Image (spheres, helix red, strand yellow):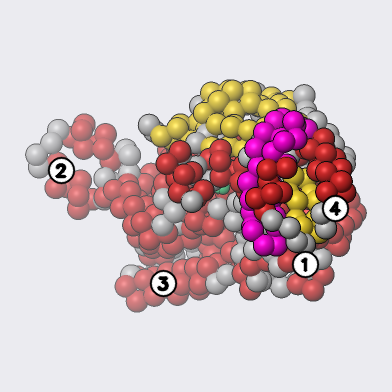
Amino acid sequence: MIKVRNLKKHFGPKVAVNGVSFTIERGEVLGFLGPNGAGKSTTMRMITGFIPPSEGEIKIGEFDMLKNPIAAKRLIGYLPENAPSYADMSVHGFLSFAAELRGLSGDANKRAVARAIEMCFLEPVLHQSIETLSKGYRHRTCFAQSIIHDPAVLILDEPTDGLDPNQKHEMRTLIRRMGEKKAIIFSTHILEEVEAVCSRAVIIDRGQIVANGTPRELKMRSDQAGAVTLRLLDGSAAAVKSKIDQISAVARSIVLSESPVAVRAFPRQKESGDEVSRALGEMASKERWKVQELRIEEGRLDEVFRGITLPDNKKEETKK
Amino acid sequence: MKEILIIAKRELRGYFSSPVAFVFIVIFLLLSGFFTFMMANFFERGEANLQSFFMWHPWLYLFLVPAVGMRMWSDERRLGTIELLLTMPVTPWQAIVGKFLASWLIIGLALLLTFPLVITVNYLGNPDNGVIFASYIGSLLMAGAYLAISAMTSAMTRNQVVSFIVSVVLSLFLILAGWPPVTNLLVSWAQPWLVDGIAAFSVMTHFDSIQKGVLDSRDLLYFLSVMGFSLFTTSVIIRAHRAG
Ligand SMILES: Nc1ncnc2c1ncn2[C@@H]1O[C@H](COP(=O)(O)OP(=O)(O)OP(=O)(O)O)[C@@H](O)[C@H]1O
Ligand SMILES: [Mg+2]
């Protein structure tokens, strides 16, 4: 549904996006991650046709954004960063205007507006002027505009920014649900959101894609991924550690705490966490350890994110 | 075409939900009344025409039109709504024309509301209504030319004040190039053909000739090309701004 090839954008001498390529089909939700200034918004602006790329190709459905912008734009719903909207209009007026520009008039317009209002919980502020709305409501109003024509492609730049926890939750549920039938790209700085919503995530750093995979795959890149943590109610840490080190699938282990005992064993291959965990379980019952917890670490996205996007000297600092 | 109308409609609603349209119309009516009756002594002249009304328009528009047009694009840029507008399925040209037409309509409305003058002058004497009609058309075209210049300057910056000032200066140049006190000064040291050439770029030259009652195609062409050129430049500026 969205096909982007070798997208580049310079602003003067500054390179904001440097060779980004990816494809998304219907039914996929792609999360855009990356530090501030990485080029997420710039990439989205190019995909939505707001700014022309310096180089590269963008296809929405069967339409080329550069050669046939109007047809391509019809397929897209877009929530820009900071959710701009016409402050002097009422929520209802604004949504009806957006629907009209999307080619919906008369009854179809009324139906589309009513649907968007219901989906974004805007009833209480329907006839209020947008400039008097709270930030969260302004955000929801702009989001409502993006889904008003039930587009096949949704591009959302930080859709949960400024929403309260309940609304964040609603928004995630909504994105996940809509993602079953649409192709969605959304950017966020909240990593749990990626795990909760995305079918795939991309990490962008300094204009380039530095990681691309399912949230699970990305987490596997973490140093801790696949490690097995064993917590006991009693015993001596050193003795436990030396036993564990004898298991052949374990590469090394570290003592997390002396008492109560907690030891983490790292497998030789990240994928063989199961095997290590099973071996540890058997060992524990043979040695009659009183096990409080035995757990395979999934790896943490924030760790992977930091590992990929921080310059090397900073990485050392955060480890300490 | 439909898109142009939708955008123009939204813009008009914006003008009327803020005081801009109202203030513009009231001030325009007050000032044109003041100049016509107090400065030009409309009644004492004893002539059955509206020359004392139209002669002020180039100067009135000089400040009032940029005040209407200054927010046209600078606000879109400042508030970021330009990103919404131009990612909708509309061409930049449709957006430019739609916004321009809405503002032009406001000025047209203000002009229309001066109709009591036409009634008065018809009541008092026997004016040439053809001349009056031509003058109204000329005035509307001149306002359109100023407005297109304001549209252009408002696309250059997100700051309304800068947009206003640049637009006043450009419009002032278009007035002065053909204003008799200036052209008389120029004649003393430049060739007459050069002075005429410069004056041909002035709104004064063309507005004056329309006020004589003939809608000459050259004058129409002049105003339409100022509008066309300025709006085209607006689209170039917007495109350049998006390209970064
Ligand atoms: N119009 C512009 N002119 C010059 N530089 C720009 C322009 N727009 C963006 N940039 C630069 O391009 C880079 C990428 O910016 P972008 O807004 O895409 O980052 P981002 O990943 O969205 O960051 P954030 O997480 O803070 O939203 C930044 O360094 C920014 O300064
Ligand atoms: Mg951004």
The magenta-colored residue range is A244-272
Q: Circle 2 sits in a helix, a strand or a loop, which is it? A: helix
Tell me whether the residue at label 1 lies in contact with that at label 3, contact meaning CB atoms closer than 8 angstroms: no
In the picture of the structure, the residue carrying the numbered disc 2 is B186
- Quadrant of the frame with the N terminus of chain A: top right
Instruction: Say whether mark 2 and mark 1 are on the same chain.
Output: no
Q: Are marks 4 and 1 on the same chain?
A: yes
Report, in whole angstroms, how far the alpha carbon at label 4 lies from the one at label 2.
109 Å
Residue at screen point 52% across, 28% down: A18
Magenta stretch contains residue A216: no
**Residue under numbered circle 4:** A288
In whole angstroms, how far apart are the C-alphas of marks 4 and 1? 46 Å
Dot 1 lies on which element? helix
Please report the residue visible at 23 percent of the width from the left and 50 percent of the height from the top.
B180
Chain at numbered mark 4? A
Nearer to us of marks 1 and 2 is 1
Question: Mark 3 = which residue?
Answer: B31
**In front of the other: label 4 or label 2?**
4
In this view, B17 is above or below A265: below
Q: Is residue B67 above or below residue A266?
A: below
- Residue sitting nearer the eye, A137 or B147: A137
Is residue A307 depicted above or below A119 in this figure? above
